[in-house]
Each structure stands twice: as structure tokens, then as C-alpha cells.
Image (cartoon, rainbow, N blue to C red):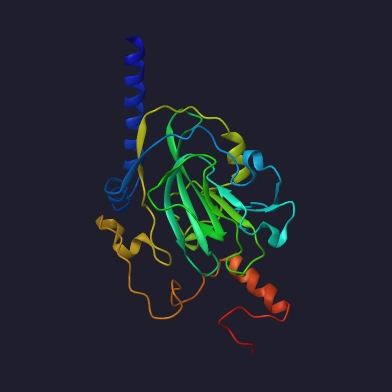
Amino acid sequence: MNGGIKALRFRLRDGLCFLGFIMLLGPADQAAAQGSVIRCQLADGFDFPVGKPNADGYYKSRGYWPNGHLGEDWNGRGGGDSDLGAPIYAAARGVVIISENVGVGWGNCIIIRHPYRDETGKVAMVDSLSAHLYQRVVKVGQVVEKGQLVGTMGGNNGMYQVHLHFEMRKNLRIGMNRSQFARDNSNYYSPTDFINKHRVLQTSFQKYPIPTGLFAPYGHSLADAGSDSGAPVKVPVLPKGRPGLPAEGPSADDEDFWSKLRSRLKEGKVIEGTSPP
């Protein structure tokens, strides 16, 4: 009897926590959260997306720092093209909210939304992004488990040396539109720090409604839909040109795209689709 009452209290508390999360969102975000959800159990802990368990055989070739590199780059000990096709795993249980070839500086990307119980005992969510993949093997709306294969390591079709670019976002509105958000700890976590602090977590058999939206399509913002009105996000028609690339081209803060371009120009090379001066 007492166990049943305790379980009911946990359900009521968690329901109120989720309701509080929804109430903090704007009208358009609330519509997205309420209109498209997948039910999922809480994560029982986080692990690194490579070399399971514990990133065995891998190292960080580039770290996270605010207002600079907003994620971590991971490589195998062999390095270079030997990493092509290496397995990439889900860092924790969660719901796939993006799985597509975004193109430009991103390439094949997967974003997974992970529900978990935070240090205060409340239900929270975090998004993990894996970019520049060679292959994607999961679909939007799919529930994945920690350590499940979600894709393979690539280099965005030769734009980069093969590696995994991995981010963890506390702001669920970012999606593929980093340039519209502050590039600091208000929106991002240091992936290694977050994982190490959340290796083992309390979970249960209860499933929670996880919103699969809250972000705008690449190159647009929720303001395009009139977020004050609560209307769903509408995707404006892009001018004809390179698929998925807005008329203004890559954003000014897309450091992955521009650093690669500078590197190739320094070597006397150009990227596909351009011609030398």
C-alpha cells in the first residue's frame, strides 16, 4: 500500500515538473510540445558516443569552449581516414528528433532528445548532436537506447578529415540554427563534463511525453511563423540554388565551414562548386 502511494506521488510530481517545463515555453513552442510527442522512459545514465564503454580507443582531437568550438571532435587512435565508418552510439536513452543530411558545413546529422532526472530530482531534457556522419541508421521519432548504433563516422563527404563532431545543448530550440543563439554556457554543455556528471541516473518504467519539435527548420527561426500567435512553424520557400542552402549562404559564425574553406584556400585548393579567382 505504502509503495503504491509513493509511486503515485512520484508520478504526480513528475507530471507537474513536465507541465512546468511546458509553461515556460512560448506559445509556438507549447503548440509544438503538445502537438507532437513521443513517450519515452528516463535515461538511466550517459556514456560517450564512441568507443563504448567509456570512449575506449578514442580521444578528443578538439575540445569544447564557449564562444568558440561548441562541441567536441572525436577521433580513433588510428586517426585520419581509418575512422571512416566507425560506429557512433546514442549517448543515452532518448528520442531521435533530427536525422537528415543538412548539407553545407554539417552533412549528415542526428539529434537525440534525452529525458533524465537532474540533480534536484526534477525531470529535464538535453539534446545531443552528432554531425559530419557517413551514415545515419535511425529515423525521426525512433526511441533509442544508450549504446545503440545510430550512425557511422564521416567527414561530410570529404569536406573535413574524418571525425565525429558532438554537441550537448541545454536549449532545445537550437536545432540546426546555432547562429540564432548565444554561443555560451547558457545554451550548451561541455559534453565530457555533462556525461561524467550523469553516468548513472535514477529511472523507472514510467514513460514521459517528449516533444519532438521546439526548433525551426534549418535557415529559419520560430519568428518566421509568428511565435507570438502560437501558429505552427511554416517553412518559407527557398530560392533555387544549392539544396538546403539559404540565399545568404552559410552563417557568419559557422566555424566548421569557414575554417575548412580557409584551410583549403591556404593549400591552394577550392571546395566543390567554386572556381579559382
The foreground one among 142 and 104 is 142
| Residue at image point 73% right, 57% down | 79
Occupied quadrant, residue 40: top left
Position in image of residue 206 (x %, y %): 36, 29
Answer left or right for 30 relative to 124. Answer: left
| Residue at image point 45% right, 57% down | 99
The foreground one among 71 and 207 is 207
Answer left or right for 212 relative to 52. Answer: left
Q: Residue furthest top?
A: 1
Q: Residue furthest bottom?
A: 277
Q: Relative to residue 55, is residue 64 depicted above or below?
A: below
Can residue 51 be seen here? The reply is yes
| Residue at image point 58% right, 68% down | 157
Occupied quadrant, residue 268: bottom right
The foreground one among 32 and 228 is 32
Position in image of residue 208 (x %, y %): 35, 36
Q: Relative to residue 204, is residue 48 depicted above or below?
A: below
Q: Relative to residue 251, is residue 268 depicted above or below?
A: below
Q: Which quarter shows the C terminus?
A: bottom right
Position in image of residue 21 (x %, y %): 36, 39
Q: Relative to residue 258, is residue 268 depicted above or below?
A: below
Q: Which quarter shows the N terminus?
A: top left
